[in-house]
Image (cartoon, helix red, strand yellow):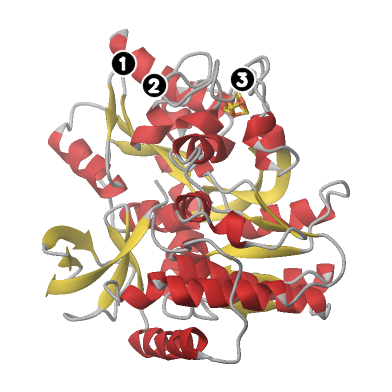
């Protein structure tokens, strides 16, 4: 029930929008994200966008992760696949 | 934003586990998360197995369906029996009070599962001759959606049973409970995207306990745990953000103003835990006419028991015991035949552990 997923806004008509996740589109209410526009990623929960995702922050985190993953001085972690299950 | 393989990069996850292992403070550390989506991510990706033995990561009361008191579920059932159409989310309809909403429906009451409170309001518009009640369960992520619908002027025959709960006062109460003994909180990414980190900064400072908000991909969880354990190590009781793509310091001000236009904080019971001051969202006076219990003349029945005999959901919700410690887990209690709310709800700790048994 609390599951919220980031989706890309593809249509905005007033407080009604449509958002896309991997080719699946659904109606999203935009009452709670008054500044959102087409192309934004929004966090969708129970039919409502509840936040606009910050793409610059996402890019910075990914850059940090690339450093973590490539740091040759870091000791290897404990065994285990750690990847998606 | 969503498709980056980086969020699940196994190399980064292993490196982060290595960084965590180097933060050993030389004593056991107990951390708590308060989000069913975190528990599912941690179980699905086997993240507990990547943590060093001195870290214990327990699941707290992060499942809104699990903490909704049986007496409030009973109110919804009685509303349906009184002739209203009761709408709610799927999990909620399956949680037992004396019976469940779904069982009441099988017995002739009108209960319907909706995906969104907006669908419930549309339903009221389509059925003007009937009272349509939305049983409003959920944390701030959901409370803001209920508030948006009430604020935008829902049909007159639409009312709610206000059972939303607000997370920050619950963490305050958990930290004030002496025998839980927490060293830090992994804050819920999506609830905090609504409240903002600033809802937690005073709590972290007052209790001297660090809190770090994390997202739900494996690297999100590991980065947040690393940042949390670094603060545990040097005793920094502060709130920090490891999920910056979704969480801002001030959260979503539009969502917060919707919540506090429509609701006000009240003392509220959490199933299995007890009353937590200021943790419930009751209808504010300007919206009090939307109260379904007043419209239908229903009062909560204090005699409805929260716990089934033998169920340890209350202790599971406080991180006092693991689901596996419950003698009913996986034998008398399974998702298809649940005894307590923690096994009914998708976000319940017992269900998450059951579904991912033997997977880690
Ligand atoms: S396993 Fe079932 S009976 Fe035991 S605590 Fe969890 S929900 Fe309750």
Between the residue at mark 1 and the residue at mark 2, the CA separation in whole angstroms equals 6 Å
| Foreground pick, B31 / B195 | B31
Classify the position of ligand 1 by quadrant: top left, top right, bottom left or bottom right.
Answer: top right
What is the quadrant of residue B242 in the picture?
bottom right
Residue B198 visible somewhere in the drawing:
no
Label 1: how many residues lie within 10 Å, few (<14), some (14-19) or many (20+)?
A: some
Q: Circle 3 is placed at which residue position?
A: B328
Between the residue at mark 2 and the residue at mark 3, the CA separation in whole angstroms equals 24 Å
Secondary element under disc 1, as helix, strand or loop, is helix
Between the residue at mark 3 and the residue at mark 1, the CA separation in whole angstroms equals 27 Å
Residue at image coords 64%, 32%: B324
Label 3: how many residues lie within 10 Å, few (<14), some (14-19) or many (20+)?
A: some
Q: Position of residue B317 (x, y in %)?
A: 65, 40
Q: Identify the mark nearer the N-term, 3 or 1.
A: 1
Secondary element under disc 2, as helix, strand or loop, is helix
| Foreground pick, B272 / B258 | B272
Q: Circle 1 is placed at which residue position?
A: B105
In the image, the residue with mark 3 has its CB under 8 Å from the nearest atom of ligand 1:
yes
């Amino acid at each position: 029930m609390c599951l919220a997923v980031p989706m890309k806004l593809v249509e905005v008509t007033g407080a009604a929008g449509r958002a896309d996740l991997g080719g699946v589109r659904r109606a999203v209410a935009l009452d709670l994200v008054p500044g959102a526009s087409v192309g934004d990623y929004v966090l969708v929960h129970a039919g409502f966008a509840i936040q606009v995702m910050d793409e610059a922050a996402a890019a910075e985190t990914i850059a940090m992760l690339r450093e973590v993953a490539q740091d040759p001085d870091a000791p290897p972690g404990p065994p285990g696949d750690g990847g998606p299950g | 934003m969503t498709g980056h393989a980086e969020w699940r990069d196994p190399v980064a996850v292993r490196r982060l586990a290595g960084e965590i292992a180097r933060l050993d403070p030389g004593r056991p550390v107990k951390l708590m998360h308060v989000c069913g989506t975190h528990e599912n991510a941690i179980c699905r990706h086997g993240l507990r197995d990547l943590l060093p033995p001195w870290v214990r990561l327990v699941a707290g009361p992060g499942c809104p369906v699990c903490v909704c008191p049986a007496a409030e579920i009973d109110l919804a059932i009685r509303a349906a029996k009184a002739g209203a159409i009761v709408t709610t989310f799927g999990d909620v309809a399956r949680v037992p009070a004396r019976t469940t909403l779904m069982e009441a429906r099988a017995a002739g009451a009108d209960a319907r599962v909706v995906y969104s409170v907006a669908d419930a309001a549309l339903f009221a518009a389509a059925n003007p001759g009937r009272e349509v009640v939305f049983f409003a369960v959920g944390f701030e992520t959901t409370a803001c959606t209920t508030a948006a619908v009430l604020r935008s002027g829902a049909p007159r025959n639409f009312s709610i049973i206000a059972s939303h709960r607000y997370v920050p006062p619950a963490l305050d109460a958990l930290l004030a409970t002496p025998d839980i003994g927490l060293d830090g909180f992994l804050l819920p990414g999506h609830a905090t995207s609504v409240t903002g980190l600033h809802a937690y900064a005073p709590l972290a400072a007052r209790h001297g306990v660090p809190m770090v908000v994390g997202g739900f991909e494996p690297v999100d969880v590991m980065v947040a745990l690393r940042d949390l354990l670094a603060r545990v190590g040097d005793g920094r009781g502060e709130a920090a953000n490891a999920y910056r793509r979704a969480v801002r310091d001030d959260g979503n001000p539009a969502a917060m103003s919707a919540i506090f236009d429509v609701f006000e904080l009240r003392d509220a019971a959490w199933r299995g835990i007890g009353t937590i001051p200021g943790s419930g969202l009751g209808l504010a006076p300007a919206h009090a006419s939307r109260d379904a219990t007043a419209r239908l003349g229903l009062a909560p029945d204090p005699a409805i028991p929260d716990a089934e005999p033998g169920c340890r959901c209350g202790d599971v919700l406080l991180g006092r015991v693991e689901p596996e410690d419950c003698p009913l887990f996986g034998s008398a209690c399974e998702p298809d035949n649940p005894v307590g709310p923690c096994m009914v709800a998708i976000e319940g700790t017992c269900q998450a552990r059951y579904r991912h048994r033997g997977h880690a």
